[in-house]
Amino acid sequence: MEETDLASNPRLRPVEVFPVQMEGQELFCLRDPQSLAEQPIFLNRVLVFIVSRMDGTNSLRDIQADFCRATGEILPMEDLEGLVKQLDQHHYLESALFRSFYEVQVQEFRRASVRTACHAGSAYEADGPALISQLNGLFTHPEGPGECKVSDAARPLRGLVSPHIDFARGGPTYAHAYRALAEHPGADRFIIFGTCHNPMLQRFALTLKDYETPLGIAEIDREFVRRLASKIQRDYFQDEFSHRGEHSIEFQAVWLKYTLKDWSDFKIVPILVASFHDICSQRTGVADDPEIQEMVTAIREIMIEVPGRYCVIAGADLAHVGRRFGDPSGPTESLLHQVEQEDRLFLERAAACDAEGVSDSIAADNDRRRVCGYPPIYMTLRCLEKADGSLLQYRQWTDLHAGAAVTYAALAFY
């Protein structure tokens, strides 16, 4: 869209909008899940109405007319133009300004030797000692697992499902997941499947960039990644920039550095996974998808070819329900009870390492609960094949005022 088009037909980028309480006032937070628009913007209901019309099809005159019809008031054109300019300056609009900014970000990321800890200082402590103290406290939290007890006879952990919700809300469940890793040591290579919360051109996204954390660098297993890229026909580096702002793998890298502090030689293979909704909508089996099968086959082969003790991790949340996520109402107590029942059935199949059963449970209701962690969980189960799983903890986070609930769990596989 050219600048002249932006002035007449502004288009909002794909962003999140959800209600918040600030100083006793209900506002709506506009937030970019890609972290390209770094600062959230808070809007009242009037501004939400105006911004909702910025879909690229409405001119400023159209928006002005819609506002007058809805409220009976005149929206001054200079005020509307000022709002468009502010949104554009903060990178919330599709525009020439945003495209220029985006290209600079992509080039800087490509030149960087490491993937920086994007969410340090917001989702978790940025200072190393403070972060260790924060994570220590999650083990002793009332919902936490308590202290670790390593046994020499412990079976090495083969797989893990861990949340990717922020630590403030899901911290104790992370602690349950990574205590299993601490108590069942042995792995030195970690294949991490993470949900990608933004659109990608391909099904998967690879990177050769080490993951930075406040506790040090989580080093990429470059040999594994290069072999993986060579075995697959598609270019999964095409979406490498998706790694920049995505938190689902970053959070696992932080926990691995914390848990394996005495084992500096471990390496990671971070793989972002796009949605499987296109497969569900086609009513075809995920196992029949050639792109997924090619990835699973390649990973299994390399796990044999490249010596190492492997653990496969899914950075995955479960259900997302309520008004914030598109439901007409709720979440209500009865809905949350129903969600828990369906989640636990899903988790039973996951613990049984039944990848197709997990897929069938999602397809049965066309993913009505919006289980964003389904793709990385499915990939983890396929790569593990026959493993013994155990549910460590299941929790729900609920904000009734915001009309939102997110569920998540920790599972260990041996």
Image (cartoon, rainbow, N blue to C red):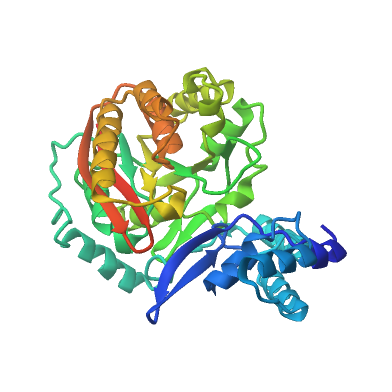
Q: Is residue 86 left or right of residue 158?
A: right
Q: Is residue 39 visible?
A: no
| Direction from residue 151 to residue 321 in the image, left or right | right
State which quadrant residue 30 falls in: bottom right
Q: Residue 381, percent across and down?
A: 37, 29
At horizontal 56% and vertical 23% (from top left) the residue drawn is: 282
Residue 345 vs residue 89: left or right?
Answer: left
x, y percentage for residue 402? 38, 62
Q: Residue at x 67, y 65 (%)?
A: 69
Position of the C terminus, as image quadrant, is top left
Q: Going 49% across and 25% down the picture, which residue do you hit?
A: 296
Residue occupying image coordinates x 32% and y 36%: 159
Q: Where does residue 264 sit, x and y in percent of width and height?
A: 37, 53
Q: Count the marks.
A: 0
Residue 287 vs residue 126, the one in the foreground? 287
Q: Is residue 85 above or below residue 319?
A: below
- The quadrant of the image that shows the N terminus is bottom right
In this view, the residue in front, 285 or 305, is 285
Closer-to-camera residue (317/192)? 317
Q: Is residue 160 visible?
A: yes
**Rendering coords of residue 368 (x, y %):** 41, 37
